Image (cartoon, helix red, strand yellow):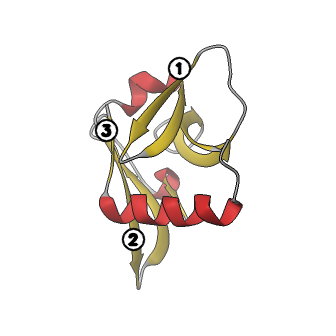
């Protein structure tokens, strides 16, 4: 359903390790906003909502809410570190228009 590249997984594991909290999961989701009507987000979370689904991707514990699952189908999370910026980037084949709204720096 959702792919996390190896370089993004390494960065996520580094961040999660710094938090030193085994109960944290990587929450991946969408919310209203952005030029295409949706903004993708990542954060660390330990709260389980009634419609959340827990999965494992590249040995990373991931939590996705039921509303976001549909929009994340086939998406890929990557991590870039270059002259144009550093951060996590979403590549989602379901998005018909895009700008920088799907990236986090």
Residue at left offset 69%, top offset 60% = 19
- The numbered mark at residue 80 is 2
Question: Of circles 2 and 3, which is in front?
Answer: 2
- Considering the numbered disc 2 on the image, is that residue within a helix, a strand or a loop? strand
- Considering the numbered disc 1 on the image, is that residue within a helix, a strand or a loop? helix
Determine the CA span between mark 2 and mark 3.
22 Å
Determine the CA span between mark 1 and mark 2.
27 Å
Question: Of circles 1 and 3, which is in front?
Answer: 1
Q: Is residue 25 left or right of residue 40?
A: right
Closer-to-camera residue (59/103): 59
Determine the CA span between mark 1 and mark 3.
19 Å
- Contact between labelled residues 3 and 1, with CB atoms less than 8 Å apart: no
Among the two numbered marks 2 and 3 on one chain, the one whose residue lies closer to the N terminus: 2
- Quarter of the view holding residue 29: top right
- Considering the numbered disc 3 on the image, is that residue within a helix, a strand or a loop? loop
Residue located beneath label 1 in the image: 67
Residue at left offset 70%, top offset 37% = 46
Q: Quadrant of the N terminus?
A: top left
Closer-to-camera residue (103/24): 24
Among the two numbered marks 1 and 3 on one chain, the one whose residue lies closer to the N terminus: 1
Among the two numbered marks 1 and 2 on one chain, the one whose residue lies closer to the N terminus: 1
- Quarter of the view holding residue 80: bottom left
Image location of residue 64, percent across then percent down? 52, 30
Q: Is residue 85 above or below residue 68?
A: below
Image location of residue 98, percent across then percent down? 39, 49
């Amino acid at each position: 359903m959702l792919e996390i590249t190896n370089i993004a997984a390494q960065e996520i594991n580094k961040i999660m390790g710094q938090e030193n909290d085994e109960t944290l999961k990587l929450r991946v989701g969408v919310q209203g906003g952005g030029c295409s009507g949706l903004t993708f987000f990542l954060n660390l979370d330990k709260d389980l909502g009634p419609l959340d689904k827990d999965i494992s991707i590249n040995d990373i514990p991931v939590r996705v809410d039921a509303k976001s699952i549909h929009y994340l189908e086939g998406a890929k999370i990557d991590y870039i570190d270059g002259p144009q910026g550093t951060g996590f980037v979403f590549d989602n084949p379901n998005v018909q228009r895009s700008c920088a709204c799907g990236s986090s720096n």
